[in-house]
Amino acid sequence: MPAITTPEAISSARWIEAEQQEFSDKFNRASFQVAHQLSAHPLLQLPALMDLADRTLKNRPDDLHYDMGKIRVEQRWDAIEKPPFFPRQALRQIEECSAWFIFRCAQRDPNYRVFLDRGLAEIKAMIGSRLESEILVEDIIIFVTSPQRVTTYHVDRECNFLLQIRGSKTIHVFDREDREVLSNEELERFWSVDFNAAVYKPHLQHRAASYKLAPGNGVHIPVNCPHWLQNDDNVSVSLSVNFQFKDGRRANAYRANYLLRKLGLNPTPPGKSALLDTVKSRAVAPLVWAKKMQKRLG
Ligand SMILES: [Fe+2]
């Protein structure tokens, strides 16, 4: 795909491209590679990101994340050093800091809203109208990563398109249906009590689909597909377009199973019986709602 570098060309070109059949077959089922036209977009270059960091610090400081240090693939997020930081300075020094800088919900900045609106519109056009009614939350995240830095093994509650803007790195994505890679117990803990519940198993690394990311390409990661990343010896900038789906039945069935397992039972995993999943989901829905309210009210 030819590089698109002028603002006019960026605004008129299609941003995200994928093979239509692969898109329909694999969306939120399996990982696959996509192409995009955003690498030269002025808003995704470091000087613009420094300005975004200043504005975010002023208006929404909780949407900035920074951590640093030599990280192991299996390391828990709560065991990673999160020192105080000055965002602009942190980005200026990103080359030397072994750091991970995250802009969460970047679409809340009016200048960046376009990435969500246009990126999602293109993705929805590829999926068809059914997607619109299924989305609960949609957002974009921008990651800036130091050379050689690892992003630890984890699963997410959203599905996303991770688009590589600057630098190269490798992402390793595992099959979420492989119960040796990702056990039911890990999924139950993930949906109930521990975002770091997925446990990396080095002896199963060969089962990952590994994608070399470079400016102009990206990867689709379905909900709950375990993954980890290894940055090359360069600063990396990536844009993630995320969706969280309305249908929480599967997640709630895992939550119910977490409670049932605590009672000493060996519960049926989600997906075996739609009726059972619905009953379990309805049973725990009030608890999930109460937990959300408690979090919202602090
Ligand atoms: Fe992730």
Image: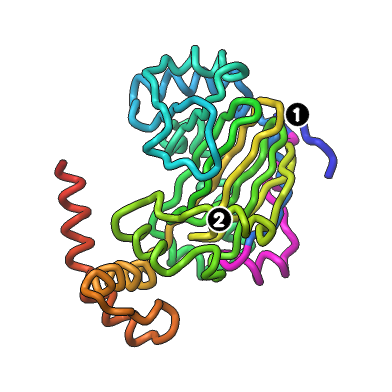
User: Left of 249 or right of it: where is 139?
Assistant: right
Q: Could you tell me which residue is drawn at 23 percent across and 62 percent down? A: 288
The numbered disc on residue 201 is 2
The numbered disc on residue 6 is 1
User: Alpha-carbon distance for marks 2 and 1?
Assistant: 45 Å
Q: Residue 34 location in percent, x, y?
A: 71, 53
Q: Residue 144 location in percent, x, y?
A: 57, 29
Q: Is residue 290 above or below residue 119?
A: below
Q: Is 23 in the magenta? A: yes
Q: Is 88 in the magenta? A: no
Identify the element where label 2 is drawn: loop
Any part of residue 117 in sight: no
> CB of residue at label 1: within 8 Å of ligand 1?
no
Work out whether residue 231 or residue 239 is closer to the camera in this orientation and state it.
231
**Type of the residue with mark 2:** Lys
User: Left of 275 or right of it: where is 86?
Assistant: right
Which span is picked out in magenta? 9-30
Q: Is residue 194 above or below residue 298?
A: below
Q: Quadrant of residue 98?
A: top right
Identify the element where label 1 is drawn: loop
